[in-house]
């Protein structure tokens, strides 16, 4: 790492599997292609109950001697030791993480927070209420209440080369993490763009919070693009170069 600049490492690539059951037996287990989103016809093919299982992109950012994890992901990553082993590959353990950032509070982004109990958690102030309304109280306590919550609003600088900005729309308090690296700006945007086409085409993501106008999400995407990042890490797609649209 060049002195004075942040270093970004993708800890876990997103995965997303559509599943189905018939008579209690699984009928489908396919890794979702990164782009585009699964078509709704998949439910019609199996004529049965379908649901999705997956986790988000999880990112490690190092700056000024500080280790920051963005969106730890689902519970199972820690429960079965994958998270701990991945950190060990980088010479780290959970206790070495100094700060966690949740881009928003959906379960697939926050459940592995529990690995970092007592650590500072940067999250938008509106997400705290949103999480309490979305889930039951014990859930919110288990995955957010155990942290030292640093509730933000607007833009906040976390270190010399690291800051968060509001990118509202997917949820009331969605934020993005911006890291200045040797190569240029890296934007970890959570589900502000679920897949790369959301940003490349300024289209409304497939999941947007009720009572938020679609234009709010689109304006957030335009704000990200105007920052001219060399790499964007969306919630559920490969990191990509927004200039070429190609995966990195």
Image (tube, grey):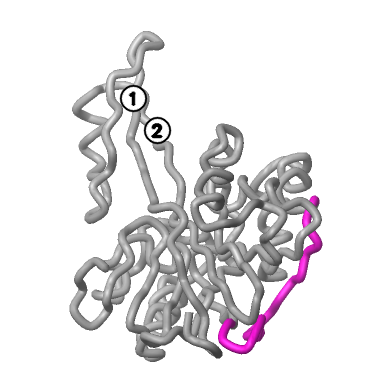
Question: Where residue 153 is drawn, which disc sits there?
Answer: none
Question: Quick one: SS at disc 2?
Answer: strand
Examine the structure image and report whether residue 157 is included in the region drawn in magenta: yes
Crowd tier of the residue under label 2, counting other residues whose Cα lies within 10 Å: few below 14, some 14–19, many 20 or above = few
Q: CA distance from mark 1 to mark 2?
A: 6 Å
In the image, residue 40 above or below residue 190: above
Residue tagged by mark 2? 51
Along the viewing direction, whichever of 152 and 187 lies nearer the viewer: 187
**Residue 42: % across, % down:** 23, 34
The quarter of the rendered structure image containing the C terminus is bottom left
Q: Would residue 59 appear left or right of 32 to someone viewing this image?
A: right
Give the percent coordinates (x, y) of residue 128: 72, 60
The residue identified by callout 1 is: 20
Name the residue located 33 percent from the left edge and 24 percent from the top edge. 20
- In the image, taking residue 153 as reference, residue 49 lies left or right, namely left
Residue 94: in magenta span? no
Q: Are marks 1 and 2 in contact (CB under 8 Å)?
A: yes
**Disc 1 or 2, which lies upstream in sequence?**
1
Q: Judge from the rendering whether residue 139 lies leftward or rightward of residue 69; answer left or right.
A: right
Please, is residue 132 above or below residue 176 in the view?
above
Toward which corner of the image does residue 71 lie, by quadrant?
bottom right
> x, y percentage for residue 164?
59, 79
Foreground residue among 199 and 216? 199
Label 1, residues with CA under 10 Å away: few <14, some 14-19, many ≥20:
many
Residue 211 falls in which quadrant of the image? bottom right
Secondary structure of residue under mark 1: strand
Residue at the (62%, 65%) spot, across then down? 101
Q: Which residues, given as a range, are shown in magenta?
A: 146-162
- Count how many numbered circles sit on residues in the image: 2
């Amino acid at each position: 790492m060049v002195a004075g600049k942040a270093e970004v490492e993708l800890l876990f690539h997103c995965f997303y599997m559509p599943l189905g059951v018939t008579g209690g037996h699984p009928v489908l287990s396919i890794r979702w292609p990164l782009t585009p989103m699964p078509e709704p016809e998949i439910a019609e093919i199996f004529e049965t109950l379908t649901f999705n299982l997956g986790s988000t992109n999880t990112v490690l950012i190092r700056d000024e001697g500080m280790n920051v994890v963005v969106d730890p992901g689902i519970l199972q990553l820690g429960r079965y030791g994958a998270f701990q082993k991945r950190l060990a590959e980088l010479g780290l353990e959970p206790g070495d993480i100094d700060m966690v950032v949740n881009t928003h509070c959906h379960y697939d982004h926050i459940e592995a927070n529990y690995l970092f109990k007592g650590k500072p958690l940067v999250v938008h102030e509106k997400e705290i209420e949103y999480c309490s309304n979305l889930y039951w109280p014990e859930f919110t306590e288990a995955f957010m209440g155990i942290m030292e919550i640093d509730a933000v609003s607007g833009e906040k600088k976390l270190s010399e080369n690291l800051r968060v900005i509001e990118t509202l729309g997917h949820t009331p308090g969605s934020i993005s993490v911006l890291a200045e690296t040797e190569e240029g700006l890296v934007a970890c945007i959570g589900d502000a763009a679920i897949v790369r086409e959301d940003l490349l085409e300024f289209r409304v993501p497939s999941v947007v919070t009720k009572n938020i106008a679609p234009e709010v999400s689109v304006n957030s995407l335009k704000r990200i693009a105007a920052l001219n990042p060399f790499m964007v890490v969306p919630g559920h797609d490969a990191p990509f170069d927004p200039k070429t649209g190609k995966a990195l």
